Amino acid sequence: MNKQICVIGGGRWGQNHIRTLNEMGVLGGIVETDSNRLHTILETYAVKGFTNLKDALKHDFDGYTIAAPAPLHYELAKEVISSGKPVMVEKPMTLSAESSKELVYLAKKMGVQLMVGHVLLFHPAIRKIKDLIDEGKIGDLYYLYSTRLNLGTVRIEENVFWSFAPHDVSVLDYLVGKAAIQIESKGSKFLQKNVYDYTMTQLSYPNNIHAHIFVSWLHPFKEQRLVVIGSQGMLTFEDSSATKEIRFYDKHIEFEKGIPITIENPTEVIPYERKQPLTEELRYFVENLDKKIKIADGKSGYEVVKVLEKSQLLIDAYNI
């Protein structure tokens, strides 16, 4: 790839961007406001370094990725898009649906690509599950659920739904192929006065498809599980397990003379190609700098933020 990408943000996740793009041979620059941290990073990577975005935009980089704290996403992305350059913004795209919508409009106006870092959409297991659903492996899609549970990492500036659930919302929308049309959400606060530690959110989609998301950072063990139920079978994937297997449960219900009969056949492990999701995501971004982003585009990022914002309102109303 004869491209040069500049990473905005040299924190924990930003350094993952930096390392991966460097391995791909396309890392061109790094923006990090902490000069000491920037100096340390540049000891490892022989690229251009900047302490502010304005200086970085003066160089002719082919695209930018934003891995800065979420409250900075909107202003940074707006500045990059306004300069006429493609950008990938980490999740959540922004902290409000209105500002996300504005970025989508601005990117269209400027004719540049806007992508959102919903990395699980590039997980080979999620891509395989999408293929299985689309080819009719489980029949008609009935419902899905996703759990993302662990003890920590507790945030002080954002609640567990904003922190964990963007992944789950993006995956559910991707697998269904549409955005949710109805949302219900509840949550509880235990550790801090204004930060929710646990939330349960139910989503309704067109064609009577339903889903729920359970997230918590107050949980005795780590669980990242996806379950997909259809009329002719069921799929599961647990990303937190050692094997990370996709399992197909050949189970369903049939009616004989009005009586429900359980059909059960042997469980099948579905093979898939094991690749690093972040590498696949960044490769997709680089390969589509001058094309059309079809996966994790700005509009899908906007739809996810709408769910986050709506859920926040519902959770707050529930706890009045």
Image: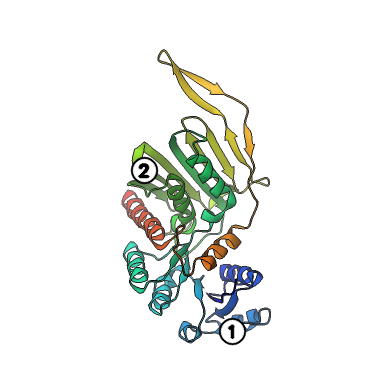
Identify the amino acid type marked 2.
Tyr
Q: Position of residue 56 (x, y in %)?
A: 50, 84
Tag 2 secondary structure: strand
Instruction: Name the one closer to the observer, 28 or 44.
Output: 28
Question: Would residue 316 appear left or right of 45 to someone viewing this image?
Answer: left
Taking depth in this image into account, of 26 and 204 the one nearest to the observer is 26
Disc 1 crowd rating (10 Å Cα; few below 14, some 14-19, many 20+) is some
Q: Which residue is mark 2?
A: 205
Tell me the quadrant of the picture where the N terminus can be found. Answer: bottom right
The part of the image, by quadrant, that contains residue 48 is bottom right
Near mark 2 (Cα within 10 A), the count class, few <14, some 14-19 or many ≥20, is some
248 in relation to 225, above or below: above
> At which x and y percent is residue 249?
57, 32
SS under mark 1: strand
Looking at marks 2 and 1 on the same chain, the residue that comes earlier in the sequence is marked by: 1
Q: Which mark is residue 48?
A: 1
| Residue plotted at (43% across, 45% down) | 176
Residue sitting at x 40%, y 56%: 304
Tell me if residue 292 comes above or below residue 35 in the rendering.
above
